[in-house]
Amino acid sequence: MKPMESDVRRAPSGTNGDRAQPAADGELESEIAVPHPRIASAFPPIADYAFLSDCEVNALIAPSGRLEWMCLPRPDSPSVFAAMLDRAAGSFRFGPTGVQVPAGRRYLPGTLVLETTWRTRTGWMIVRDALCIGPWYHSQRRSGTNRRPPTDYEAEHILLRTARCVVGEVELSLDCQPVFDYGRTSAKWEYAGPGYSEAIASGGELDVPIRIVTDLRMGFEGPGAHASKTLRQGEKAYVAMVWPRSRHSTAKEYWEEHPAPATADEAFQRVERTADYWREWINRGEFPEHPWQSYLQRSALTLKGLTYSPTGALLAAPTTSLPETIGGERNWDYRYTWIRDGTFMLWGLYTLGFDREANDFFYFIADVAKGKKDLQIMYGIGGEPELTEKTLDHLSGYDGSRPVRIGNAAYQQVQHDVWGAVLDSVYLHTKSRDYLPEVVWPTLKRAVECAIENWRKPDRGIWEVRGRPQHFTSSKLMCWVACDRGARLAELHGDLGLAKSWQATADEIKADICDHGVDDRGVFVQHYGTKALDASVLLIPLVRFLPPEDPRVRATVLAIADELTVDGMVLRYRTDETDDGLAGEEGTFTICSFWLVSALCEIGELDRARALCEKLLSYASPLQLYAEEIDPRSGRHLGNFPQAFSHLALINAVMHVIHAELGVSNKFGVGAPSPQP
């Protein structure tokens, strides 16, 4: 792909470039615009990273084989490897010496095990990377973090990397340079056994140590551990990185609870066992026989990898501060759970037949909402309510994009869509089982009451704008969802009086939206009193606010398709028409483009829907992953990666197109599951 101007970095400020130069007589010559020399970015494109998970921690690996993002012992903990945000903030490479560009990369089919094939001048090598998952091992005592019912498998807290020379001979290098606490604390290394094969790296008092076990001979140079060995055809090697659940779990018995492989053969067996786990999991899903099946499966695996299995939470993304614009300030921490994701999560997982994960996330929502007067829009993956936002000014940011943020101040925002998201999640869960858990009824009742109390007030909207609150149409829409789904659930609960009252309020909200949220063209707008468009109103047909044949629905979908797109890809809104409190532009939002696919299917524009879906699928990363945004001009992925919302919307859109092609009704049911209520 031809690099865009945003893909290259300017020359250091010490070069003269286009600055005025003194003339011979001492006077300044007039300024002449001389282009700066351009230097290729030191950062890989966001889409080129591979994503690994054991459903308790995540890792991102660059094409060079360098681990460049990993936080321990939880995905929202301080990083141990963060070269993705600053080239000096820690990395871990295991691959051939002197070669940075692989011959090929792929996931083993149906898994989150990465396989990289390397060609050198002397031979060929295959490296596999996996975050190990094995049998449940808490047989003597309970897990200190698990709140959901245990399964047969559990994360082993091991990053395992294996290498095998398949042709000729290849020199293999190990270079592990952790920098704890977001690049602030260098590692202190010490050997952990009588030989050179085991070592422990420690950070500060609050950091968990990591243990490196390998069949190479390690030595320490500066802040890193290094080793090299020449492998000949048929020979194998491995390295395992092990960590405890917390800094309090570093006694000998904790390390022995899930020991690293002792030999290369055992390491290869562990990788295969992890691959088998993922294949068994994906086989539980229901995937249509269709050319797009692989995209559905990869999205399902990615969503599973973004779950935090001890609580059932879903991370919006495993990263922080990957920029929406290269060099811009729109850099956010997405390592948390948004309640609105609940509805889309349940839509996607029920559609593909993954009931257990949907059930776990449902009960995570029930846990955080229980007994709370006010429901927040987002929580930590352990249910933490406070997510204080800070900037890390010592980090340069991805490709110079600053500030780097941790925490997210949006947790304090008032967003009226949260109650509708909860009610729709519960309604979908209940509909799939014909059963309403009594334990959640008080929470549901309070959520509907909050929607009724607040629907007339302005808020910050689904996009969490940091400008002035407005009467956002999508927020009113989700308040309608809260009352509509609440009325149906109240009827199921046997409270007919409440059902009638809530339905009356739903009808009042609908009338208000249709009176004030539509412009003179019959198009639903971003907020009351404006003519600006907003992609969030594409949810109107998807949540069954109005039937798809309603002329206002059709006009809205086509207006967004024609006027809120760049090269066919959908923007959230136009930044010059929206007071979002931020400077700069942003790319097209992947989820909005997939929403448009679904909405086009709803109004019968199947040819346009299929064409847009094909285009979106062509923008997938080499490993079929999606970031939050896509630059429609270059195809470059922008924002945090991989993004749960994007993959959830992909499932919804692809299934819409497939069902439309087959003539299957988009009603949620056993025969033809669909993400529609």
Image (cartoon, rainbow, N blue to C red):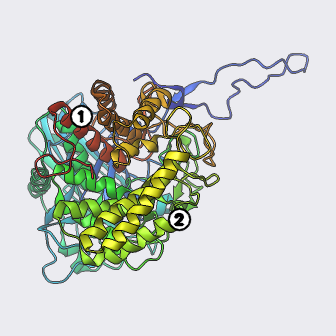
Q: Residue at x 49, y 71 (%)?
A: 386
Q: Amino acid at mark 2?
A: Asn
Q: Classify 232 as above or below 408.
A: above
Closest to the observer: 592 or 282?
A: 592
- Image mark count: 2
> To which residue does mark 1 refer?
657
Q: Position of residue 381 (x, y in %)?
A: 37, 66
Secondary element under disc 1, as helix, strand or loop, is helix
Closest to the observer: 673 or 399?
A: 673
Q: Position of residue 169 (x, y in %)?
A: 16, 35
In the picture provided, is 449 more to the left or to the right than 70? Answer: right
Closest to the observer: 547 or 374?
A: 547
Q: Classify 47 as above or below 314.
A: above
> To which residue does mark 2 refer?
454
In the picture provided, is 213 more to the left or to the right than 220? Answer: left
Q: Position of residue 589 (x, y in %)?
A: 44, 39
Q: Classify 34 as above or below 395.
A: above
Which residue ends up furthest to the bottom in the rendered image?
141
Q: Residue at x 59, y 57 (%)?
A: 458
Q: Classify 612 as above or below 212.
A: above
Secondary element under disc 2, as helix, strand or loop, is helix
Task: Choose the circle earlier in sequence order: 2 or 1.
Answer: 2
Residue 196 visible in image:
no
Q: Amino acid at mark 1?
A: Val
Of marks 2 and 1, the one in the foreground: 2
Q: Residues within 10 Å of mark 1 (few under 14, many from 20)?
A: many
Residue 142 visible in image:
yes
In the picture provided, is 155 more to the left or to the right than 266? Answer: right
Q: Which mark is residue 378?
A: none
Q: Residue 480 sits in which quadrant?
A: bottom left
Q: Position of residue 64 (x, y in %)?
A: 33, 39
